[in-house]
């Protein structure tokens, strides 16, 4: 399977955000990608960060989904769209999966919120597996993949060959400037990517915004835990890579034995 990880700059308006999606989706398709993934809550942008988030209501949510579904169908490429989902309970962070026929397969919500997100969003409460061209995959969104490894293992033990990880990590105004992927003195995020892969023996595809001060690169990690490829920090673009599905055996995930975790009780 050929996958693509799209890393756009923050979009100041809905129209500019949609234009970026259209362009990067087209570029991914031109390079033979079968599925392309966008960052966390790209429309309208992740709230609580150091940039303005444009107005985004249920009507704009539906407009966005319809537009992206149309482009997915036109370019014949499945799409994972990071978008804000409006519910009766409040806003959720979600990743919608749209197949190459433009049909929405469903969505994965962010169920483990970062504490700083509690004032903006409500968590989801379910997980699901997806399948495109015979390849099963899961989605774990940002904080879930960094701090809650079980969100990735959930998909791996159910046969996922790859877990996509839409995220936002870094700043538009100030932070560290990374120059070396996985550097010992750098933030822990890229090391966490390696762990999510190697502890499950699957591919892990982490997709960040192209931020001025990125704290992790948009990266594809092989089942061995090695970084197969990544985009340069701060550079808008699309990373297109071929994955060898047979290498994603899920061996370590399938050996997970929850029955051995029963709480010990003394007589």
Image: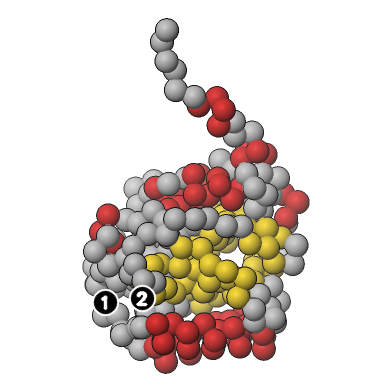
- In which image quadrant can residue 234 be found? bottom left
* Res 243 label: none
Q: Position of residue 223 (x, y in %)?
A: 63, 48
- Residue that numbered label 2 is attached to: 45
Image point 47% across, 45% down: which residue? Answer: 149
- Residue that numbered label 1 is attached to: 51
* Lower sequence index among marks 2 and 1: 2
- Name the colour scheme: secondary structure
Q: Residue furthest bottom?
A: 15
- In which image quadrant can residue 53 be found? bottom left
Left or right of 117, for residue 72: right
**Do residues under tags 2 and 1 come within 8 Å of each other at their CB atoms?**
yes
Q: Residue furthest top?
A: 267
- In which image quadrant can residue 34 be found? bottom right
Closer to the camera, 101 or 192? 101
Closer to the camera, 257 or 235? 257
Image point 61% across, 57% down: which residue? Answer: 129
Give SS at disc 2: loop
Q: Taking the image as drawn, is residue 142 in sight? A: no
Query: Callout 2: 10 Å neighbours few (<14), some, many (20+)?
Result: many
Closer to the camera, 161 or 175? 161
Q: Taking the image as drawn, is residue 72 in sight? A: yes
Left or right of 39, for residue 173: left
Q: Position of residue 9 (x, y in %)?
A: 40, 79
Quarter of the picture holding the C terminus: top left
Q: Position of residue 67 (x, y in %)?
A: 54, 88
Closer to the camera, 100 or 228? 100
> Is residue 25 placed above or below 197 in the rendered structure?
below
């Amino acid at each position: 399977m050929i996958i693509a990880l799209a890393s756009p700059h923050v979009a100041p308006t809905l129209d500019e955000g949609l234009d970026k999606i259209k362009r990067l989706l087209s570029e991914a398709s031109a390079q033979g990608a079968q599925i392309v993934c966008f960052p966390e809550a790209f429309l309208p942008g992740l709230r609580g960060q150091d940039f303005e988030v444009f107005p985004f209501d249920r009507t704009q949510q539906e407009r966005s989904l319809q537009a992206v579904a149309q482009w997915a169908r036109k370019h014949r490429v499945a799409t994972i769209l990071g978008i804000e989902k409006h519910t009766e309970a409040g806003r959720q962070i979600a990743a919608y999966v749209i197949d190459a026929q433009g049909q929405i397969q469903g969505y994965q919500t962010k169920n483990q919120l970062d504490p700083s997100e509690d004032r903006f969003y409500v968590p989801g409460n379910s997980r699901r597996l997806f399948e495109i061209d015979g390849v099963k995959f899961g989605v774990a969104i940002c904080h879930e993949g960094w701090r809650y490894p079980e969100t990735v293992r959930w998909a791996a033990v159910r046969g996922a060959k790859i877990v996509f990880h839409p995220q936002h990590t870094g700043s538009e105004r100030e932070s560290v400037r990374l120059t070396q992927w996985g550097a010992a003195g750098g933030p822990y995020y890229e090391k966490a990517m390696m762990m999510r892969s190697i502890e499950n023996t699957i591919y892990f595809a982490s997709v960040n915004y192209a931020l001025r001060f990125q704290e992790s690169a948009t990266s594809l990690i092989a089942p061995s835990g090695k970084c197969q490829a990544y985009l340069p920090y701060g550079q808008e673009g699309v990373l297109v890579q071929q994955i060898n599905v047979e290498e994603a055996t899920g061996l370590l995930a399938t050996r997970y034995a929850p029955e051995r975790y029963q709480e010990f009780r003394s007589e």
